[in-house]
Amino acid sequence: MKAKVFLLVVVVSAAIVMSGCGWLEQVASGVSTVVGTGDTAIVIAKTAEIRTSYAVVAGDLLEVKRGDRLDVLDQAESPDTKGLFWYRVRAHDEGRTEGWIEAQNVITSAVLDKSRKLAESFENVPPQAAGQLRAASNLRLASDMSADNVLYRLASGSTFEIMSWKFVPKQEVPDVDDNANSAQKGKHSKNEEIEAANDDDEPDKLDDKYDTWYLVKLDPSVSPAPAGWLFGRQVELQVPTDVQFYQENNRKFVAWQRLDSETAEKGTVAKASTPGNWVVLTRANTVEAIDGVEPEFDGIVVYAFDKYDQNYYMVWRTNGQVWGQLPLRIDGTGDSKSFIVKLRGPDGQIVDKRFALVKDKGGRLRVTPPEDIGQFMKK
């Protein structure tokens, strides 16, 4: 009798399991989707609180610090503040604290991987310039204002190296300053003054027609994400103080690299500890597009420091405008150096042009440009 009962229980149990497989799979699937993302996050705020919930009146459970790693269990949008997202996380403390943290205080590993992939695109390219944020701004995966390409919000005053930039027509960019407190929305309207200038055959102004976006490289001390795009209106270029005085109002310094041995091998574009020699790329504030493409620079100038006179002097500059593209590269070591830029020739082809650097008997720097450089200049 007991054997029959046992056999009946086994048969019924098997039937329940088989018929309920679909239900069990649905439950498991639902749990994995709602509860567990399988992702991790790194705290990017100086300090942040893990809270009991994402409600306004929620209590604090644990304070975490920049660099702490958390397991991501779930995510949700706050019903009290639309657009404010939260992650349910598990901390790696002794009590394995679980709670909610504001998304703006962390960066997930999935987002971090996207930034690292972007950094791979300029892995072998030297920095072209240096910059600093005037105000807090979103670091993005692409050069547009789409909400779905935001990596996270970078703090005001953050510094970075500029690897490249892009001119985006203003009518394609929302009229905002990339600041959450801004109430401005919509698109740029046409500038009547620009239209009037066109009627008078005056050249369009570059900064009237375009917004600039910068592709930047970030140091780990500034950001866990190594790369991203920043809206140009929030960026202040950090021109080296050595040569900043020589910048003209109608021609801005847009890229620079040091030529002497102190930092050239490292590709340094920031301030150096001692005066040195610099190659600088410049850009006039006029529209110069060819086939719809703007040059990234239109002038080249080389400055050197005379250690006897303790003054800078101009070594060489383009006698007229060129049409150039990044990157600027330094080649060679010691006293055998040259710099290479990409210039558009009269046939429309973009070619590398090498400028040799030599020192005369008095130790003063001299530039030997390519023999055909005149063909690349527009008077």
Image (spheres, helix red, strand yellow):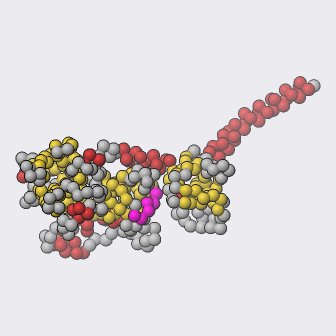
Magenta-tinted stretch = 152-157
Question: What residue is shown at x 8% (from left), y 58% (from top)?
Answer: 319
Split into 4 quadrants, where in the image is the C terminus?
Answer: bottom left
**Left or right position of 283 against 155:** left
- x, y percent for residue 182: 43, 71
Toward the front, the furthest residue is 308
Split into 4 quadrants, where in the image is the N terminus?
Answer: top right
Question: What residue is shown at x 52% (from left), y 63% (from top)?
Answer: 83
**Left or right position of 279 against 67:** left
**Between 210 and 58, the one nearer to me in the picture:** 58
Residue 140 appearing in the image: yes
Residue 294 appearing in the image: no
| Number of marks in picture | 0
Question: What residue is shown at x 22% (from left), y 75% (from top)?
Answer: 193
**Between 75 and 247, the one nearer to me in the picture:** 247
Q: Where 51 falls versus 96 (above or below)?
A: below
Question: What residue is shown at x 50% (from left), y 56% (from top)?
Answer: 44
- x, y percent for residue 377: 10, 55
- x, y percent for residue 368: 9, 49
Q: Is residue 262 magenta?
A: no
**Left or right position of 151 against 242:** right
Toward the right, the furthest residue is 1
- x, y percent for residue 369: 10, 49
**Between 36 and 20, the one nearer to me in the picture:** 36
